[in-house]
Amino acid sequence: MKVLVLGDANVDLEITLPAAESVGVHTNPDPVLFGGGSAANTAAALAKLGVECRFVGTVGQDEHGAFAIDSLKSAGVDTSLIVQVAGEPTVQVIVVVQPDGDRLIYVWPPAGGAHSALTEEQACSAIAGAEWVHVTGLCLRVSPAAESILAAMEAAGAAGIPVSLDLNLRLENWGWDRDFRSVVEHAVEHAEFVMGAAFDEIVPLAGVEDPRDAAMVLAGDNRTVIARRGAGGAFAAHEGTITSSPGFHVDVVNTVGAGDAFNAGFIASRLHGASLETALQTGNAVAALTIGQPGARTSPDRPTLETFLTDRLP
């Protein structure tokens, strides 16, 4: 096993709004159900790129939980360590896609959910044999998942396994409730790679207005902080320097899962020994290919990615 992904798996119910000029009783597209979850999306994208990947998490004993597991299996992810739990539902994310490809996101239920049930034993026992561990901040708001992920990050670091953290703060939905900031800061301390949106996550976490300065603050002396900037590409702060890579121009259909896809491209590239600049470039390319299609699980396979890069790079 090369990559172990710990975190959330759910379903996305996607509703695409028609353009204003085409609105009518019989023209509205039907809602579509996709596999979702930030961590699960990254796992699926890694598997589609040919990276051996195992997902560890919890879903409900319900139809949506079974759908979430099946969608990961169909992408090539090892789902043998996913546990279905009673008493909590699999979260449903309602994604309203606007005509310009941007989206509004609603979560049901708004609190709780089966992903919170991840145990420390489940998380830590899965680490053996991994070459990379990836986690998401979405599970750092709920117990016992938060404590379990922190323990797994610490154990992986002690074993010399690279750990990446996608912040996924979602401050626009929940803010810095309870002791969430201190939990995130603890997670950052145990991450070799920290990934997040430049203005929505890196800046508020660091408390510094300029995203490059904010990334440098979070990077400190011993980690790499990757700031995603959407169409502007991405940059990384590492050992006092900034490495940047521009984005790729594509026609946007749906931006859901773009950050998750970027993470997979970046991790896959680093596992192949690529430089930081090349890994950023690959992450941008995987994200670009994903937002050109509906759903969060439309990331490319490796031949498609290589063709895309060959056609667009000197």
Image (cartoon, rainbow, N blue to C red):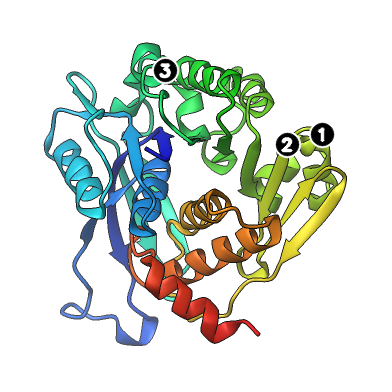
Q: Position of residue 3 (x, y in %)?
A: 43, 40
Answer yes or no: do the residues labelled 1 and 2 have beta carbons within 8 Å?
A: yes
**Looking at the rendering, in which quadrant would you find the N terminus?**
top left
Amino acid type of disc 2? Arg
Q: Which residue is mark 3?
A: 124
Q: Which mark sits nearer the N-terminus, 2 or 3?
A: 3
Task: Determine whether the residue tagged by mark 3 lies in a helix, strand or loop.
Answer: helix
115 or 73: which is nearer to us? 73
Answer yes or no: do the residues labelled 2 and 3 have beta carbons within 8 Å?
A: no
**In the image, 244: left or right of 308?**
right
Q: Quadrant of residue 301?
A: bottom left
**In the image, 257: left or right of 235?**
left
Q: Which residue is mark 1?
A: 220
Cα–Cα span, label 1 and label 3:
27 Å
Q: Position of residue 75 (x, y in %)?
A: 26, 54
Q: Nearer the viewer, mark 1 or mark 3?
A: 3
Position above or below: 231 against 51:
below
